[in-house]
Image: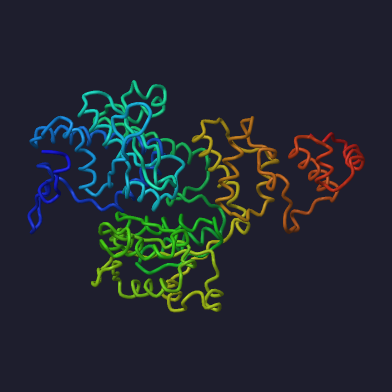
């Protein structure tokens, strides 16, 4: 038998009435690609990209090694080479990726050299996590490494030269022996150790325990002596307490909820709270940014499609509504959905049924729907950009999340938690803020809300040379911030305000008085005079 002779109809054995499926005489399972994508996202959120890559690569390696072992004795091969080349053909038949031969090329000898099209891993990574800076087909490269290592009885490591997950037109895999790779393989060796699946799972368990210990320690550092919120949300303001109360109450029913508020206020975090506090907590939580998906693909992403329904639809695909069965789906940026798709969404919500693209029958779905937007949908309705009937169908309960500038009590608790988290991620020893830095955090209006606060604090933790974040470590717009409005309790002498502002500008420009004077719009002589008047050198 040759590798090209492998035929899906002959390899796949099943009872039409259901039961055990076998592929090449080994039991196999049918797993939904979107579900695997969700698992991938959860692994990355729990373990980070490196930890998730290690688990998925080693899983693929063990799978590839075992597959090569089984095929060698399970099928009558014409030669050892035919068995060695069968791995790519199997990948294609199993629907994981379409493997093509690129033909000969100059350079060092390659054990493996393939073009990959329609990689399910790249597809799912883009869907759930967006574009990556690095190749993402970890399970597939692990499988190829394991298969070839067993087939050639030597250590062979496969890497992606190109990957759709990082914006390339297709994926391209190359495989070499450890000797042929030389020093280039060193950064990747931790992912390609000959570890069994049991060892990989043992490492996952250990890493999960470390994560749990870190989270517990982080909570203790972040909220010393403070109130404990079982939801995991960090808040002190009465406004967010009201949001939390409404979210918990609405979680007990299956009503559709519309979450509104500016970008970055934490709408998805509240949506997750509603899911976690509901009877659907054991089911999946699926989120999609409707504004990030091209209009011509949005229907397929939400409802799925059948093979042949459009160019590139090479196989049936489950949509996110079906993937969220028994759980919750969050339609983020619902205000970005085009009018033609709004009609179909309304029908799905009213009838609790969807129809895959290219299919002529309805499928029942059992997913709780949450929607979120930073747009004013009433204004969108007036402008004929959003359907009024869909708006009322989504807005059974509306939860408006106030911007961070309207809940100043939350700024410092959130900031402290972000400092602890960033210090843990980066290995820095940063414990908090100087009083001046804390004061500036409270003065800044945070137009980007919680997301901007988190990014600003991560930057500060990375840049600070001290154990506490100071004003000069903050982004310039934060360090130079003055309050938009003054309340009675904030009133200070004008001279004090001017002095503090001049000192902030000097710190922001590293003490350069000429540059500070230019930013303040005054002459250098005036700046020197004011510094002398205030009895300060600006430090």
Say whether residue 142 is visible: yes
Q: Residue at x 35, y 72 (%)?
A: 349
Query: Residue 318's quadrant in the figure?
Result: bottom left
- Asked whether 63 or 164 is in front, the reply is 164
Q: Is residue 448 left or right of residue 257?
A: right
Q: Quadrant of the C terminus?
A: top right
- Asked whether 485 or 168 is in front, the reply is 168
Q: Position of residue 355 (x, y in %)?
A: 28, 69
Q: Position of residue 79 (x, y in %)?
A: 13, 31
Q: Is residue 410 above or below residue 473?
A: below
Q: Is residue 198 above or below residue 324?
A: above
Colour logic: rainbow
- Asked whether 157 or 519 is in front, the reply is 157
Q: Residue at x 27, y 37 (%)?
A: 60
Q: Position of residue 14 (x, y in %)?
A: 9, 52
Say whether residue 201 is visible: no
Q: Position of residue 276 (x, y in %)?
A: 37, 55
């Amino acid at each position: 038998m040759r590798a090209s002779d492998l035929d899906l109809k002959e390899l796949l054995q099943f009872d039409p009435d259901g039961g055990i499926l076998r592929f090449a005489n080994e039991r196999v399972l049918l797993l939904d690609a979107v579900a695997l994508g969700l698992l991938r996202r959860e692994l990355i959120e729990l373990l980070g990209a490196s930890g998730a890559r290690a688990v998925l690569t080693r899983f693929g390696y063990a799978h590839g090694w075992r597959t090569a072992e089984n095929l060698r004795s399970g099928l009558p091969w014409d030669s050892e080479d035919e068995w060695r080349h069968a791995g790519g053909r199997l990948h294609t038949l199993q629907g994981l990726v379409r493997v093509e031969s690129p033909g000969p090329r100059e350079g060092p000898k390659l054990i493996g050299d393939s073009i990959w099209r329609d990689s399910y891993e790249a597809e799912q990574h883009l869907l759930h996590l967006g574009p990556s800076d690095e190749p993402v087909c970890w399970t597939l490269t692990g499988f190829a490494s394991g298969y070839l290592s067993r087939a050639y009885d030597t250590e062979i490591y496969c890497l992606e030269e190109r990957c759709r997950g990082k914006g390339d037109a297709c994926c391209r895999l190359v495989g070499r022996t450890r000797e042929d790779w030389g020093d280039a393989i060193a950064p990747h060796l931790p992912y390609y150790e000959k570890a069994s699946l049991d060892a990989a799972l043992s490492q996952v368990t250990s890493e999960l325990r470390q994560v749990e210990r870190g989270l517990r320690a982080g909570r203790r550092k972040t909220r010393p002596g403070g109130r404990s919120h079982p939801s995991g949300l960090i808040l002190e303001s009465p406004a967010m307490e009201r949001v939390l109360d409404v979210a918990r109450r609405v979680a007990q029913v299956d009503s559709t909820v519309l979450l509104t508020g500016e970008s970055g206020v934490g709408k998805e975090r509240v949506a997750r709270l509603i899911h976690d506090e509901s009877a659907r907590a054991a089911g999946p939580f699926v989120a999609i940014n409707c504004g990030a998906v091209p209009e011509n693909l949005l229907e397929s992403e939400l409802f799925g499609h059948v093979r042949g329904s459009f160019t590139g639809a090479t196989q049936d695909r489950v949509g996110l509504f079906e993937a969220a069965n028994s759980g919750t789906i969050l339609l983020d940026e619902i205000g970005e959905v085009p009018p033609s798709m709004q009609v179909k969404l309304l029908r799905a919500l009213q009838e609790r049924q969807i129809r895959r693209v290219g299919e002529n029958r309805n499928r029942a779905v059992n997913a709780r729907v949450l929607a979120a937007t930073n747009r004013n949908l009433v204004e969108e309705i007036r402008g004929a950009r959003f359907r009024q009937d869909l708006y009322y169908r989504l807005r059974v309960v509306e939860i408006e999340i106030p911007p961070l500038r309207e809940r100043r009590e939350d700024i410092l608790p959130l900031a402290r938690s972000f400092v602890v988290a960033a210090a843990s991620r980066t290995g820095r020893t940063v414990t908090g803020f100087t009083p001046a830095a804390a004061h500036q955090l409270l003065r800044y209006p945070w137009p980007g809300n919680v997301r901007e606060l988190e990014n600003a604090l991560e930057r500060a933790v990375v840049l600070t040379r001290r154990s506490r974040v100071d004003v000069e470590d903050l982004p310039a717009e934060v360090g130079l911030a003055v309050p938009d409005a003054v309340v009675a309790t904030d009133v200070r002498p004008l001279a004090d305000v001017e002095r503090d502002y001049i000192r902030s500008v000097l710190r922001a420009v590293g003490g350069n008085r000429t540059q500070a004077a230019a930013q303040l719009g005054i002459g250098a002589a005036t700046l020197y005079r004011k510094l002398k008047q205030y009895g300060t050198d600006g430090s």
